[in-house]
Image: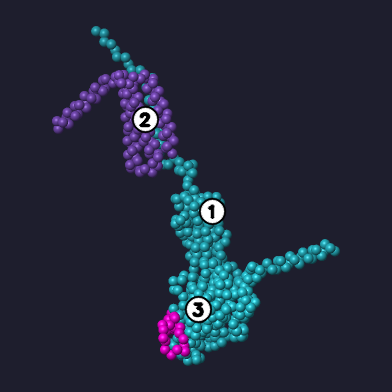
Amino acid sequence: MSQLGQVIGILRKLNDEYQISTPKKLKLIDAYLVYVLLTGIIQFIYCLLVGTFPFNSFLSGFISTVGCFILAASLRIQLNTTNRSTFNVTPERAFADFVFAHIILHLVVINFIG
Amino acid sequence: MARLSIICIGLILFVTVWSSSLNIEGSSKRVLVLLDNLAIRETHSFYFKQLRDREFDLTYKSSDDSNLQLVKYGEYIYDHIILFAPGTKEFGGRLDAEILTQFVDAGGNVLVAGSHIIGDAIREFAGECGIEFADDKNAVIDHLNYDVNDNGQHTLIIASPDNLLASELITGEAKKVGLPFLFRGIGMSSDSENSLLLDVLTGSSSSYTANPDEKTLTEYPTTVGKRTLLVSVLQARNNARVGFVGSLDFFSNDFFQSPIQSNDGKKSAKSGNEELAIALTDWVFKQRGVLRARNIRHYLKQDKTTPSFYTIKNDLVFNVQFDEFVHGKWMPFNGTDVQLEFVRIDPFVRTTMKNNGGQLEAQFRVPDTYGIYKFIIDYNRIGYTHLFSATQVSVHPLRHTEYERFITSAYPYYISSFSMMVGAFLLSFIVLYHRDEMPKTKVE
């Protein structure tokens, strides 16, 4: 019981620290990431229930969510000023990469969705 | 004047050509009758008269006539042959067992009658057809079913219509009328596994084939019981028909007309010989039981067009017209058991066709597998010619534009993909135009 209490305490501390120290922009990107994650999970559950009939459509939709999640996560990493030591890229460069990768991703998704 | 004569000559030529070509149906009735004894024309006159009444064109020749020939200028001059010459050792002229076999291979029909003595030429021809006659001087003997006019050796036997093949095409009304048959001659045997031979009339279970002059049998009889064939027919793979009757007297005027009184007192005013002989001759000479298929059409069910290729899961309709030759005319066939197969190595579809006054039709869905298919009709029934028809079509898979679009069950996936795109677009606005507030510096 005390272990559960310790875990809850740690999580609360993590949440407080997060609210104080992260910039607003990154928090907005995090909200977007949560939204993409939920969409992906809902799609997967739907496929489990209904079956894989248009399998290409399922794959296309699911890969779209996974790809968007990855691209948004990498944008967040590159925009975070505390990561300047490992990722030395300008925010403009990060955003340009994000947009270019998204164009290719959505092209492929629309082609495969059938 | 010159013009008039030219017109006259032209008209005469036209009429002769037209009249000779009018005989298309009639020209398949030229019969060569081979006799070893010209008195047979009189003793069998009722039979020959019935054939002439049916418009057969009979040519009587002696079997050792040195002018015998079947082929003239490369064409057969007879369509059917009646061999009432059982004792022939060798045919005269240009005829022998091999030429007779070639005649059957070319589609000609033959009716052969046997007797106590069978010559080598007839034996050889029968051997080619799968029929083995018993040795010379043998006869079919039946001690329990003989006529009282018999000479004591019990060779004039009475064959019961119960032993007759139940096919109205081959035997006519003989089985229904139920009159017994008189028979005096030799028995035949054949391989029971031969699918092309039919036993039309067999002896009763107490009959056998042996030499009637021997008081005691020294060896096992050639044929016993129901395997003693009295009348047997062969329908070859090219649908030519050969009939074998073990008794020449079967066709004689005596046997056609005499009343029957069997040894156990059963009487009959007339024998069934005439009915069976004429029905058998009609069948062997292709006046009954001939089928043809024409007008094969296949088309899509919805718009009745015939495309150059079908696509998987089309609904299609197959149509064919079957005719049967009955009493000199082609009538619509009325069988209901014709099957159609749609075959690509193995049959994918096998349906029974519906008969609509001779027009057979089948509807089905093309299977889900693409390839080269054939519509196969393989109709093989007792008494009818074997009909095989194969029509080839190709079946293509769906083109990339023929698949289902906008599948209802995939709408969530479509919605999620587009929402991802919209979300990324909105996120890009936030990333570009959001300014973090500068932290207020505390001035202390």
Q: Who's cyan, chain-wise?
A: B
Residue at (42%, 37%) from the top-left corner?
Answer: A112
Query: For numbered disc 3, what is the local secondary structure?
Result: strand
Q: Nearer the viewer, residue B128 or B264?
A: B128
Query: Where does residue B143 sit, x and y in percent of width and height?
Result: 44, 88
Residue B244 - label: none
Magenta segment, prevailing SS (helix, strand or loop):
loop
Residue count near mark 2 (Cα–Cα under 10 Å), binned few <14, some 14–19, many ≥20: many
Visible in this render: residue B267? Answer: no
Q: Nearer the viewer, residue A42 or B261?
A: B261
Q: Residue furthest right?
A: B1
Q: Chain of mark 1?
A: B
Quarter holding the C terminus of chain B? top left
**Mark 3 / mark 1, whichever is N-terminal:** 3
Give the residue type that dot 3 points to: Val
Residue at (40%, 31%) from the top-left corner?
Answer: A105
Query: Where does residue B179 sit, x and y in percent of width and height?
Result: 50, 83
Residue B323, above or below B185: above
Visible in this render: residue B125? Answer: yes
Query: Where does residue B78 sit, x and y in percent of width and height?
Result: 62, 72
- Disc 1/disc 2 C-alpha distance (Å): 51 Å
Residue count near mark 3 (Cα–Cα under 10 Å), binned few <14, some 14–19, many ≥20: many
Q: Name the residue tied to disc 3.
A: B231
> Do the residues marked 2 and 3 share a common chain?
no
Residue B207, above or below B419: below
Does the magenta-highlighted stretch encompass residue B332? no
Q: Who's purple, chain-wise?
A: A
Q: What span is in magenta?
A: B204-226
Residue at (60%, 84%) from the top-left corner?
Answer: B37
